[in-house]
Amino acid sequence: MRQVFVPIFAMIIFLLFWEGLVWVNDWPNYKMASPSDLWPAFWRFKGLFLTFGWETLWRTIVGLLIAIAVGVLFGMVMGFSKVMREGLYPLLVGFNAIPKATVVPIVALMFVGQHDLNTVLIAFMISFFPIAVSVSIGLSTLEPEYRDILRSLGASQLTIFWKIALPKTLPEFFGALKVAVTLAFIGTNLMEIVSPHGRGLGALFDSGKTNADYPLMFAVLIALAVLGIALYYVVVVLEKIFAGWAERSTD
Amino acid sequence: MKILNDNDLIVIDGVSHTFNTNSGSLPVLDRLSLSVPENGFSAIVGPSGCGKSTVTRLVAGLLKPDEGSVWFQGEKVTSPRSTVGMAFQNPVLLEWRSIIKNVLLPLEIVPNDLSASDRESRANDLLKLVGLSGFEDKRPSELSGGMRQRASLCRALVHRPEVLILDEPFGALDAFTREDLWLTMHRLREEEPFTGVLITHDLREAIFLADQVIVLSGRPATVQYNQSMPQQGPRSLDQLYKPEANEMLNILREQIRIARKGEEPAA
């Protein structure tokens, strides 16, 4: 009960504070739209919010799934082989250091017109790094005794990975996935905003900007926040199911 | 020193080994030879860092010696064999598994023809023997350090290994828990036939548990002293507080002192 009501209560307080702030300062809505301006904006574009929201969501999820596959693969390679780690790590760090906003126009030119592909690609590129790092660290910090216990019984590398390394890395993996979820949304939106004739919530945001429809821009932000929260909690539920053992009981 | 004895289960024959580290080569063992009789229990003591753990890895087949050979039941050890059970100072239980599932782990890897219920009753028997009945379905994080180490012992023994290798298994426990576990070890020895190799820093632990105490010299290690215990097999804690035990401790302490002296570089 408390777990449901406390967050809702906090959200109501936040909205009231926001509304009050705009009202007290008498800000025009191009400075800051108030929550009461948002509902009409949502209502006016409800069809677009649904279709574009769905586009943003599925692109983010697909980008994230690719990030998981590639990130886990890189993480495994770097976690098991010291040589590969020494070789790949600087490359990955450098790649990650490049602000993805600069990569967006390059990718948009590279696959011109392929909006879905571009968007998924950026979502993937921005979010796979934390996954690769966490998996590699999880695997390389596996205490040697775990390996010795299984190896002394004649277990293969694959068995060791499956029985010990993989489950032991899951808490780190889910920690990274939570970060990756928000990053993937950033990636999706970067491409949607920048692409001409783009679709998705990012494009809706951009059209709000061109049409000076400021409440619409704020409404998109809220819609993105809602999607972000939803996807984040999906990861939390998955974490509870697959890595719930790592949670210490607090009592 | 060449050992030829039908009774020996493990024979380490003239083993030398060197580790290559970033800061150069580090010889750890120098023509080490020792043997452990079947169903015997040998404790290996020596200065810290003298290569004791390397010996356990050799016996388990996890490490190939540069020189010399390791024999197991008259067969040369070249790779890991499932007839070994291991327990370390860190109990390394799998946190995501219940205690009984942890104990069952070796049976998932070692080929055997036990049915699921046979495996479980085997694990339950062992847990009962070490006093962990009622904790089968608990997670390792819910157990105390001593209890985790008991579970780790069960896991090391569940597949009925011929050799139980213990690498400072009780080192991180408090004195009372340690004594409890020593008694548990003797109980296990009575019920389960196995040959034990114990690495320890604790001389009292060595003389209480082992039939034979081997003192290694400083690095690179070789056998410096080999003491057979007057009493073989299970014994009671009272004996540890008798004058004879003190005499034995003094002899061993003196040997360790000599070993450390030989090892000490110009400081």
Image (tube, coloured by chain):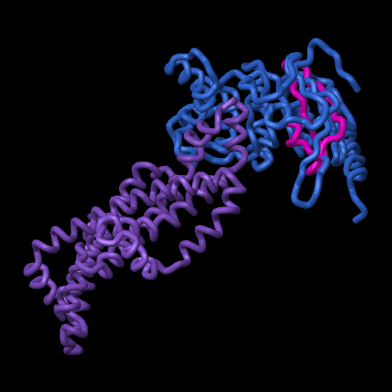
Chain colours: A purple, B blue
Quadrant in the picture for residue A44: bottom left
Q: Where is residue A63 in the image (x, y as percent from the top left)?
A: 32, 53
Q: Position of residue A142 (x, y in %)?
A: 56, 44
Residue situated in front as seen by the camera: B140 or B114 = B114
Q: Is residue A159 magenta?
A: no
Residue occupying image coordinates x 41% and y 51%: A250
Please determine whether, in this image, residue B9 is positioned above or below residue A108. Answer: above
Question: Given the current orientation, which residue lies at the most extreme bottom position?
Answer: A25
Q: Where is residue A194 in the image (x, y as percent from the top left)?
A: 27, 70
Residue occupying image coordinates x 38% and y 66%: A103
Q: Does the magenta stretch include residue B50?
A: yes
Please determine whether, in this image, residue B235 is positioned above or below residue A144. Answer: above
User: Which region is colored magenta?
Assistant: B28-56
Residue A209 can be seen in this image: yes
Please determine whether, in this image, residue A47 is positioned above or below residue B111. Answer: below
Looking at the rendering, in which quadrant would you find the N terminus of chain A? bottom left
* Figure label count: 0
Q: In the image, B43: left or right of A59? A: right
Question: Given the current orientation, which residue lies at the most extreme top position?
Answer: B6
Please determine whether, in this image, residue A217 is positioned above or below residue B187. Answer: below
Quadrant in the picture for residue A107: bottom left
Residue occupying image coordinates x 83% and y 12%: B5
Q: In the image, B106: left or right of B18? A: left
Quadrant in the picture for residue A7: bottom left
Residue occupying image coordinates x 29% and y 51%: A62
Residue A248 can be seen in this image: no
Q: In the image, B144: left or right of A99? A: right
Residue situated in front as seen by the camera: B39 or B17 = B17
Residue situated in front as seen by the camera: A219 or B178 = A219
Q: Where is residue A58 in the image (x, y as percent from the top left)?
A: 24, 53
